[in-house]
């Protein structure tokens, strides 16, 4: 039903790209620093969604036990690294914003 | 063997952080730090005999493993990195474990972070794998952002935030481009990408996005916003590493793209951007009255020279220029940073190198090197870049060279005047002077080794530069400062503006691609 409405364009990849664009919009319009950090997180979610869908194979199994059709595990593994970096960077950015406020500059 | 180049500094970063947390004897802390800094040297020296070498971590096949290499493309990057880090390590050891600041809490984490930066940069420089390159570049950039924020200077936090936002944005776009390339070729290893590459619109778009994000990280002109503040606000050894080494890592990425994927469809646009960056950096540098900001704007300008090498598809010229810039810019930042520390100011009118002859000689030598005067290393590299240019571009190139000389003449002229402020730290330590003068001597040694001749044209260039300098001074240009022309009221607005520029440049690249 949904697929016939969107003409097959509504995939994980396109949704990811749209999320990236929404995040960019946030970074271009919001002056609040915390909102900017949230925008960066939206971008990162978009990228992760895009990547995990790259490895998707229709009807594929998780590549733990060998079966006929498997999804590509590599993009998902790569995204683990990116997610870890994201968490660290978000906490650092928030701490930095606190210090900027304390400085009063 | 090659993975140890990366693994050892990372291991020692962990150990120094641990020793630091348990408050073990300071001497062990210093020793571990220095061992960590020099630890990649033995591996590097053992391996350069049989270059090019490559290894897959863990002995896997190339398809499923992570490949690390040491070849003609990254040899000079790694060599420059190791030289600069060894000397800056000595400098930092004196600067941060001395009596005056060792009890400051933010200072305690600087040395482990520097080792992390060391490992991150080396990891990015030896990797021949897109994702590995991205991860290590991330480690290096993040630790340098934290190092900037550790500075006690006013405004360092804001500079750090600006750096963080710009770098995050470009990172996400870079990894998005990696995704497209992976989807199209099925590999992340550069050699396998080259073997399986079928040029298509998607790949070109991916290369465009990846290049723009690398340009952000390298601080090339329309995307340079984060660079001058971050490099000027950081402490002397940190800014030496940032300007000398960290901005070169994305350039290595661009060279990998040039060699393995091909970026010739952007060559014209990149040449324009390179020249714009060269002139913009010089223009802004001439107007600065802050010594470290002057040097930071010259980094923008000099990265334009490197980009010119890449844009003219001459890998060797770009690599040699990177090596040269690594030596002289980190030397300049160390020298000027030492003066700034001793005088407790960065204002050019208040600084002076009259009281220290060693620093004076070093800064003059390094200024000649960055200006491309002939027995120094800059001359050799500029000659190589020049050989790819023709017609109008040659004149532009000479004009940029003269501009650099004028700007450094200003720096030296101001430093030669007796400063209005006397040195507060009685004498700069001999280790600090040693690090600076060694880098100055290295620019001379490598220059003579590669290009042992004197060019008469250089004398003409110096004369023109002197004439331009004194006429500009007569006109009173140096009394103006640029800070009042372009101001944005809040940090949030600045980020909005920079994001807009970033999107604009990406669109520019994509439009150039499809029309």
Image (cartoon, coloured by chain):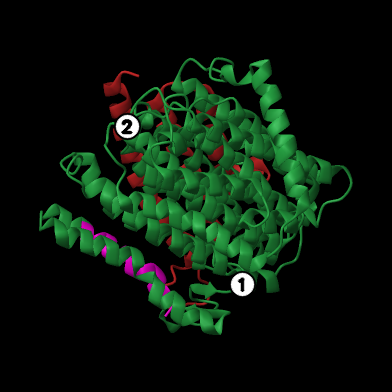
Q: Which chain is red?
A: A
The C terminus of chain B is located in which quarter? top right
In the picture, measured across the screen, residue A25 lies left or right of residue A105, that is right
Above or below for B319 versus A65: above
Q: What number is the disc on residue B450?
A: none
Above or below for B130 versus B399: below
- Label 2 is found on which chain of the structure? B
Q: Secondary structure at mark 1?
A: loop
Image location (x, y in percent) of residue B204: 73, 54
Q: Main secondary structure of the magenta part?
A: helix
Above or below for B430 versus A100: below
Q: CA distance from mark 2 to mark 1?
A: 45 Å
Residue A101 in the magenta stretch? The answer is no
Residue at the (61%, 72%) spot, across then down: B72
Image location (x, y in percent) of residue B52: 58, 79
- For label 2, the residue is B423
Which mark's residue is nearer the viewer, 2 or 1?
2
Neighbor class of circle 2 (other Cα within 10 Å; few <14, some 14-19, many 20+) is many
Image location (x, y in percent) of residue B328: 53, 51
Residue at the (51%, 60%) spot, across then down: B442
Mark before the other along the chain sequence, 2 or 1: 1
Q: Give the magenta-colored segment's residue range.
A: B1-16
The N terminus of chain B is located in which quarter? bottom left
Does label 1 lie on the same chain as label 2? yes
Above or below for B105 versus B14: above
In the picture, measured across the screen, residue B21 lies left or right of residue B469, that is left
Task: Say whether residue B8 is visible.
Answer: yes
């Amino acid at each position: 039903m949904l697929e016939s409405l969107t003409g097959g364009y509504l995939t994980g990849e396109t949704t990811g790209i749209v999320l990236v664009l929404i995040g960019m919009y946030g970074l271009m319009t919001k002056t609040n620093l915390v909102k900017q950090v949230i925008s960066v997180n939206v971008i990162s979610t978009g990228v992760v969604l895009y990547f995990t869908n790259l490895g998707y194979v229709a009807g594929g199994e998780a590549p733990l036990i060998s079966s006929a059709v498997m999804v590509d595990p590599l993009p998902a593994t790569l995204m683990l690294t990116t997610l870890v970096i994201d968490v660290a960077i978000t906490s650092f950015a928030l701490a930095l914003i606190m210090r900027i406020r304390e400085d009063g500059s | 063997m090659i993975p140890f180049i990366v693994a050892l500094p990372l291991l020692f970063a962990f150990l120094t952080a641990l020793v630091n947390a348990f408050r073990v004897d300071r001497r062990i802390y210093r020793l571990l730090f220095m061992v960590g800094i020099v630890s990649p040297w033995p591996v590097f020296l053992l391996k350069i005999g049989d270059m090019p070498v490559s290894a897959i971590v863990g002995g896997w096949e190339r398809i499923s493993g992570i490949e690390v290499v040491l070849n003609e493309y990254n040899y000079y990057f790694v060599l420059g990195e190791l030289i600069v880090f060894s000397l800056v390590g000595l400098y930092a050891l004196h600067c941060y474990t001395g009596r005056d600041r060792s009890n400051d809490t933010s200072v305690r984490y600087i040395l482990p972070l520097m080792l992390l930066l060391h490992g991150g940069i080396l990891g990015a420089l030896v990797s021949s794998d897109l994702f590995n390159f991205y991860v290590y570049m991330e480690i290096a950039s993040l630790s340098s952002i934290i190092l900037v924020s550790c500075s006690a200077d006013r405004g360092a936090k804001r500079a750090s935030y600006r750096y963080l936002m710009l770098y995050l944005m470009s990172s996400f776009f870079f990894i998005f481009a990696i995704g497209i390339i992976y989807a199209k070729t099925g590999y992340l290893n550069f050699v396998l990408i080259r073997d399986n590459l079928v040029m298509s619109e998607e790949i070109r778009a991916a290369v465009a996005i990846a290049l723009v994000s690398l340009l952000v990280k390298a601080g090339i002109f329309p995307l340079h916003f984060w660079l001058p503040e971050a490099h000027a606000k950081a402490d002397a050894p940190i800014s030496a590493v940032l300007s000398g080494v960290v901005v070169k890592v994305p350039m290595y990425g661009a060279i990998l793209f040039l060699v393995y994927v091909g970026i010739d469809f952007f060559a014209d646009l990149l040449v324009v951007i390179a020249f714009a960056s060269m002139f913009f950096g010089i223009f802004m540098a001439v107007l600065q009255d802050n010594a470290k900001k002057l040097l930071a704007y010259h980094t923008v300008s000099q990265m334009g020279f490197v980009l010119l090498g890449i844009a003219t598809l001459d890998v060797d010229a770009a690599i040699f220029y990177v090596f040269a810039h690594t030596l002289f810019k980190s030397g300049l930042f160390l020298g000027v940073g030492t003066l700034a520390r001793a005088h407790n100011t960065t204002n050019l009118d208040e600084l002076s190198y009259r009281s220290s002859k060693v620093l004076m000689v070093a800064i003059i030598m390094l200024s000649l090197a960055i200006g491309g005067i002939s027995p120094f290393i800059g001359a050799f590299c500029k000659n190589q870049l020049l050989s790819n240019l023709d017609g109008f571009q040659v004149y532009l190139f000479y004009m940029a060279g003269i501009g650099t000389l004028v700007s450094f003449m200003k720096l030296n002229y101001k430093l030669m005047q007796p400063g209005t402020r006397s040195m507060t730290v009685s004498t700069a330590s001999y280790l600090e002077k040693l690090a600076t003068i060694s880098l100055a001597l290295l620019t001379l040694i490598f220059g003579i080794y590669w290009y042992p001749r004197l060019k008469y044209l250089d004398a003409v260039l110096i004369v023109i530069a002197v004439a331009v300098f004194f006429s500009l001074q007569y006109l009173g240009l140096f009394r103006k400062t640029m800070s009042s022309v372009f101001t944005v009221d809040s940090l949030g607005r600045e980020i909005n503006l920079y994001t807009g520029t970033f999107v604009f440049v990406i669109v520019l690249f994509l439009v150039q691609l499809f029309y």
